[in-house]
Image: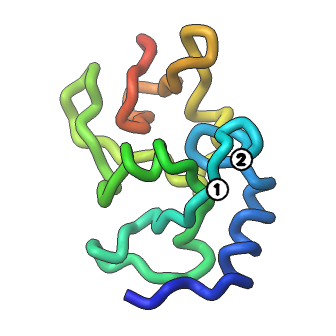
């Protein structure tokens, strides 16, 4: 699996404002470098095209893994995970519990983490 060119990686991080595109936490707060995540993982046919790549913190990248969908904890239905290229974060997700958990705002919004009631 070839590494992404450094210029592409820097373009992705700059586009994201040097924040994780899943939790919006700044690289400075995380204290670790961001990684490039494939929104549709390579293992599922995802490409290295710019529109399939996003900046992620290590924790979000590890938690998300090679998934594009997960079980909605309230409905039990398979739901797509948040896509930072096609969805606006504040329209689908919010911080809760004093900024310790990300919650979905609608029944099928999901980041694979705890959710609030719709």
Residue position marked by numbered label 1 in the rendering: 33
Residue position marked by numbered label 2 in the rendering: 27
How packed mark 2 is, by other alpha carbons closer than 10 Å (few <14, some 14-19, many 20 or more), is some
- Label 2 element class: helix
When asked about the image quadrant of residue 28, the answer is top right
Residue 75 or 100: which is nearer the viewer?
100
- Mark 2 / mark 1, whichever is N-terminal: 2
* Residue at horizontal 55 percent and vertical 18 percent from the top: 100
* Residue at horizontal 31 percent and vertical 42 percent from the top: 79
Query: Residue 26, image x and y in percent?
Result: 73, 42
Query: Residue 58, image x and y in percent?
Result: 50, 50
Query: Residue 55, image x and y in percent?
Result: 62, 59
- Label 1 element class: loop
* Residue at horizontal 56 percent and vertical 44 percent from the top: 22
68 horizontally vs 24: left or right: left
- Give the position of the C terminus as an image quadrant: top left
Residue 53 or 32: which is nearer the viewer?
32
* Residue at horizontal 57 percent and vertical 14 percent from the top: 96
How packed mark 1 is, by other alpha carbons closer than 10 Å (few <14, some 14-19, many 20 or more), is some
Q: Specify whether residue 33 is in view.
A: yes
Give the Cα separation between the discs numbered 2 and 1: 6 Å
Residue 105 or 25: which is nearer the viewer?
25
Residue farthest along the front direction in this orientation? 31
Residue farthest along the left direction in this orientation? 76
Q: Mark 2 and mark 1 in contact? Answer it, CB < 8 Å.
A: yes
């Amino acid at each position: 699996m070839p590494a992404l060119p450094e210029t592409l990686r820097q373009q992705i991080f700059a586009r994201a404002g040097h924040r994780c595109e899943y939790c919006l936490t700044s690289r400075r707060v995380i204290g670790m470098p961001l990684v490039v995540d494939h929104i549709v993982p390579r293992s599922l046919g995802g490409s290295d095209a710019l529109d399939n790549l996003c900046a992620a913190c290590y924790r979000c990248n590890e938690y998300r893994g090679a998934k594009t969908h997960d079980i909605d904890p309230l409905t039990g239905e398979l739901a797509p995970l948040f896509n930072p290229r096609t969805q606006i974060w504040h329209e689908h997700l919010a911080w809760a519990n004093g900024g310790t958990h990300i919650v979905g705002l609608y029944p099928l919004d999901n980041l694979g983490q705890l959710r609030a009631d719709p």
